[in-house]
């Protein structure tokens, strides 16, 4: 199999790369929908992200990739083995990448229980589906707008719950289903229903790059990759490893990233001023802002983190007329935050309940790679 095109070698499309990286830092954000014309590196970016993610620790005899350090999320089989005192070996495996075909059925996605065997022999046999394969990895759906709405609903439910529960005739089986959900689509081929659009945490609209020098750079890099994929990947390996380590450090720092009551007020005011329906966007912005702060090595979010998060959380949620612009920039959002916060959008104030102030690495981002 040819070497996967490096994530760090992708030219431009900063907003798309930012959305993917922040979902990698905090897999509980809720996924990203990438909308754009053909040939804009949508699928390339998704595959490349999975390739640079840190390896995952799991039981060698587990079919679902359960995390040995999180017993509360174990599958039915792992819980039974633990109860019986079975000896378990642990191994490190590459982050899974699963490509869901447009023709996927409900059974193919969630898995199936063999009811006949359960009735005749009293054995519970579960055949894993796509959700099991994608656990703790990346689930990629190309042309998500062409997938059956019911299947999309199932995927989004699992992404939100982090668990897949299958019940048939009084028999149940559960396993963890925590994954980074990445959907791509070409709007020219039809859109998703508004209810499904809102279920994707982040959304990015991308277009082909207009800058001549960058277009030339794209051609040069792809020609070099096609000529010798292994050598090309080897050339970019140091940058890939650097980004992989930064994501790993951000994941470890994320639980320590705090926010103030002022930050929460700013997010709520921002959503209200833009007439955003529901409350999902507020929670998404907070999670994404915390992930961005962790990626930059900080332990407190700022107005800039909120602006960058809002830039990704609002495009598919703001109601617009036919002649209005389809995007709102991070700079415009930052200005709006400053106005709403009365010039105090830097996250200073009383620490929100449940978040304790911490010392140490806050502000140490001088040598960190920034997502801007």
Image (cartoon, helix red, strand yellow):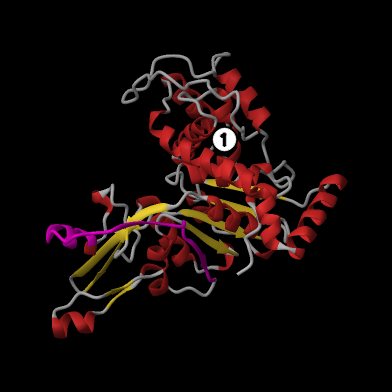
308 lies left or right of 176: right
Is residue 68 highlighted in magenta? no
**Residue plotted at (66% across, 55% down):** 233
First to last magenta residue range: 78-101
| Quarter of the image with the N terminus in it | bottom right
**Residue plotted at (70% across, 46% down):** 13
Residue 291: x %, y % from top left:
49, 36
Between 288 and 284, the one nearer to me in the picture? 288
Residue 207 visible somewhere in the drawing: yes
SS for dot 1: helix
Q: Residue furthest right?
A: 212
Q: Is residue 227 above or below residue 273?
A: below
Residue 174: x %, y % from top left:
27, 62
Q: Is residue 263 above or below residue 239?
A: above
Residue 317 visible somewhere in the drawing: no
Mark 1 closeness class: few <14, some 14–19, many ≥20 residues within 10 Å: many
85 lies left or right of 45: left
């Amino acid at each position: 199999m040819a070497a996967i095109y490096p994530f760090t070698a992708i030219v431009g499309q900063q907003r798309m790369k930012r959305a993917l990286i922040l979902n990698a830092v905090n897999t509980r954000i809720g996924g990203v929908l990438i909308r754009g014309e053909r040939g804009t590196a949508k699928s390339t970016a998704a595959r490349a992200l999975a390739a640079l993610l840190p390896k995952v620790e799991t039981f060698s005899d587990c079919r679902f990739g359960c995390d040995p350090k999180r017993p509360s999320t174990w599958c039915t089989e792992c819980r039974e083995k633990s109860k019986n005192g079975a000896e378990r070996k642990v191994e490190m495996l590459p982050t899974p990448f699963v490509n869901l075909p447009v023709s996927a059925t409900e059974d193919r996605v969630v898995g199936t229980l063999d009811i006949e065997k359960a009735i005749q022999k009293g054995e519970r046999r579960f055949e894993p589906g796509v959700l099991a394969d994608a656990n703790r990895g990346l689930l990629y759906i190309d042309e998500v707008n062409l997938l059956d709405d019911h299947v999309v609903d199932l995927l989004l439910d699992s992404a939100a719950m982090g668990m897949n529960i299958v019940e048939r005739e009084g028999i149940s089986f559960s396993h963890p289903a925590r994954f980074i959900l990445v959907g791509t689509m070409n709007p020219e081929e039809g859109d998703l229903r508004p209810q499904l659009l809102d279920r994707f945490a982040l959304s990015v609209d991308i277009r082909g790059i207009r800058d001549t020098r960058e277009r030339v750079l794209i051609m040069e890099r792809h020609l070099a990759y096609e000529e010798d994929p292994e050598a090309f990947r080897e050339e970019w390996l140091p940058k890939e490893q650097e980004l992989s380590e930064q994501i790993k450090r951000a994941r470890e720092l994320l639980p320590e990233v705090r926010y103030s009551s002022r930050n929460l007020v700013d997010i709520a005011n921002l959503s209200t001023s833009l007439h955003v329906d529901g409350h999902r966007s507020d929670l998404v912005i907070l999670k994404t802002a915390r992930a961005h702060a962790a990626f930059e090595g900080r332990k407190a979010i700022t107005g800039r983190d909120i602006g960058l998060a809002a830039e990704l959380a609002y495009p598919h949620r703001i109601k617009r007329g036919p002649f209005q612009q389809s995007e709102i920039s991070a700079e415009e959002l930052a200005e709006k935050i400053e106005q709403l916060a009365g010039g105090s959008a830097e996250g200073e104030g009383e620490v929100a309940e449940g978040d304790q102030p911490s010392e140490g690495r806050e502000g140490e981002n001088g040598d960190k790679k920034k997502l801007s």
